[in-house]
Amino acid sequence: MSSLLSTADTTADTTADSRADAADTARPAAGEATRRRLTERQAATVQRVTEALIDELDEAGYDGLTVRNVARRAGVSPATAYTYFTSKAHLVAEVFWRRLVALPDTPAAPGQPAAARVAAVVRDVSVMVAGEPRLAAACSPALLGTDPDVRVLRDRIGAELHRRLLAALTGDGAAPGRPPAGRDADLVEALDFLVAGALLRAGTGHMSYDDLAERLASLVHLVIGDRP
């Protein structure tokens, strides 16, 4: 009987959510998710689910994480959550992506050498990561997934980190208009590997998140040297 009631409740929730989503389709898009454009109401639902993820991670960790439990914590039906997120890996990747793009670009002081500019960028990213260690640790297994939506987010995260590193390296600002060439291309590729490797190392427990910022900054100076 209890299972029948649970099924009935879920069906009712799903039907109500689906009707409300359908009613919202005529509204202007409020943002873009990995899988589709969102109305304002849909974006608010996604926001509730992504916010609930952090509390669920703190309580259950990545191994115990399920989209169903996150949905329950967010106050939506599991079917609604699965409308936006195909898996727990997709959900974790989406939240990390949102954190990264919300991080302000790192300002550079006039006359600052390249190593100092890049070190400031990796410090800012490292501090963001260290601020939510459960999320950061969950990203290591999540971003290695084969889910197509995870692959999209993995590429976006890599591209955003690359953009920040390249802008700091060349001093061209937050959105450089030219691709790197020659030594710049080699250096930014080395920095991409350095940052990705350090984040993976910390995520697998081989480095403390608290040590990540200074260790990365030190290695940045080693790689870039005295380039202006």
Image: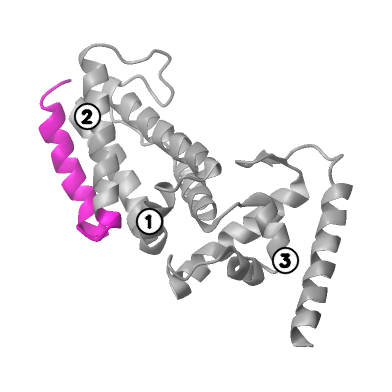
Which residue in the protein does label 2 denote?
A: 190
Q: Identify the secondary structure beneath mark 1.
A: helix
Sooner in the amino-acid sequence: mark 3 or mark 2: 3
In the picture, the disc for residue 136 is 1
In front: mark 1 or mark 3? 3
Q: Is residue 32 left or right of residue 228?
A: right
Q: Amino acid at mark 1?
A: Ala
Residue at disc 3, secondary structure = loop
Q: Residue 135, located in which quarter of the rendered image?
A: bottom left
Asked which quadrant contains residue 137, the reply is bottom left
Per the image, label 2 sits on a secondary structure element best described as: helix
Indicate the position of residue 66 as horizontal and vertical percent values: 55, 66
Label placed on residue 126: none
Q: Position of residue 87 (x, y in %)?
A: 56, 55
Graded by Cα atoms within 10 Å as few (under 14), some (14 to 19) or many (20 or more), the crowding at tag 3 reads: many
User: Which residue does the image show at 18% across and 36% down from the upper left?
Assistant: 220
Residue 141 higher or lower than 149, as above or below: below
Image quarter where the C terminus lies is top left
Where is residue 1? Give x, y as percent. 79, 88
Amino acid type shown at disc 2: Ala
